[in-house]
Amino acid sequence: MVVDKDTTAGRRLVRALSAPFNALDDLGRQAEFYGASIGWTYKAVARYKKEQVRLIAEVGMSTGALAVIGGSSVITLFITLFAGVTGGVQSFDALKNLQLEALGGFASAIINPRLLTPIIAGASLAATVGSGFTAQLGAMRVAEEIDALEVIGVRSLPYLVTTRLVAGMVTIIPIFAMAMVGAWFGWKITQVGFFGLSEGTFDHYMDTFMQWTDILYSFAQAIGIAVVVILIHTYYGYTASGGPAGVGQAVGKAVRTSLIAVLSVELCISMALYGNSDVFRISG
């Protein structure tokens, strides 16, 4: 059967058949972009020190109205604080049904560093820092500022993308530390302050089951998630097109993609670190 490409049905069939190949082409372009961005790390840090310092300050404290409330660090702290409150409520209710509500500190020590904080911090990073990067680079692309950099002999990829990646790596450590504190505090204040669990009991199980390796692994997860989120958002901003509307679409695509990537990276890293773990056994 011969299909006329000029008809509506023919165009739809052509788009349907070419969609998988277009997706592979896009993945190839993204992989090339990510590899080049990471490969420029040393030279970008050595050549663009002032821009690097400016971006570190911007990522950590943000600019404009966000800087008034403390920027990304404080925003992430509050998001994980309320996530800890939610986790404290849900875990206490589940443990109470088993008459094990005394193990609230145990749940906090295991769930927060291994699962809750990396995911929530990654989502907040995408919503604040990542979307800002996409909007900035997208606006520069549609205004032809990136092309202007290339014309005057400045490599736009290391100057605009790699410096932002390095800034994210530097600032993710204090941001994630604040996120971890917020999650633990929210979990504890809920179970001790609102549900009446003994503070001594909570602290006992928290201190007993908290492992320093879990904290180190949690930071490793945060760094991996931050790398993926920043690379995705800078890619969509760097390749934006179509004027202001195209920048908005790029931000939306970047946020959706990065949220999926956060969960995927968290799953892969958690399975690698804890998939064969058999440390805690509760019996009675």
Image (cartoon, helix red, strand yellow):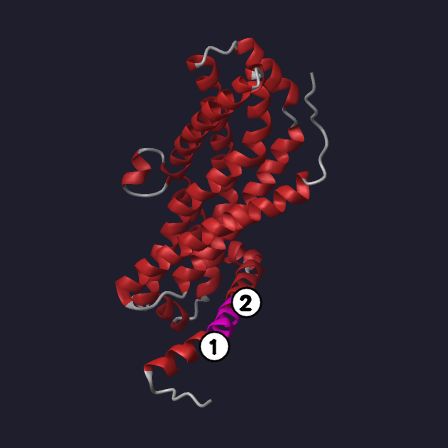
Task: Give residue 167's position: percent from left, percent from top.
Answer: 48, 48
User: In the displayed structure, would residue 72 be above or below residue 187?
Assistant: below
Task: Give residue 103's position: percent from left, percent from top.
Answer: 58, 18
Element assignment for label 2: helix
Task: Give residue 117's position: percent from left, percent from top.
Answer: 51, 35
User: In the displayed structure, would residue 2 be above or below residue 135?
Assistant: below
Sooner in the amino-acid sequence: mark 2 or mark 1: 1
Is most of the magenta stretch helix, strand or loop? Answer: helix
Q: Which residue is mark 2?
A: 32
Q: Amino acid at mark 2?
A: Glu
Q: Which residues are magenta?
A: 18-28
Q: Amino acid at mark 1?
A: Leu
Q: Which mark is residue 17?
A: 1
Query: How many residues crowd around disc 1 within 10 Å: few (fewer than 14), some, or many (20 or more)?
Result: few
Towards the viewer: 279 or 63: 279
Towards the viewer: 154 or 25: 25
Element assignment for label 1: helix
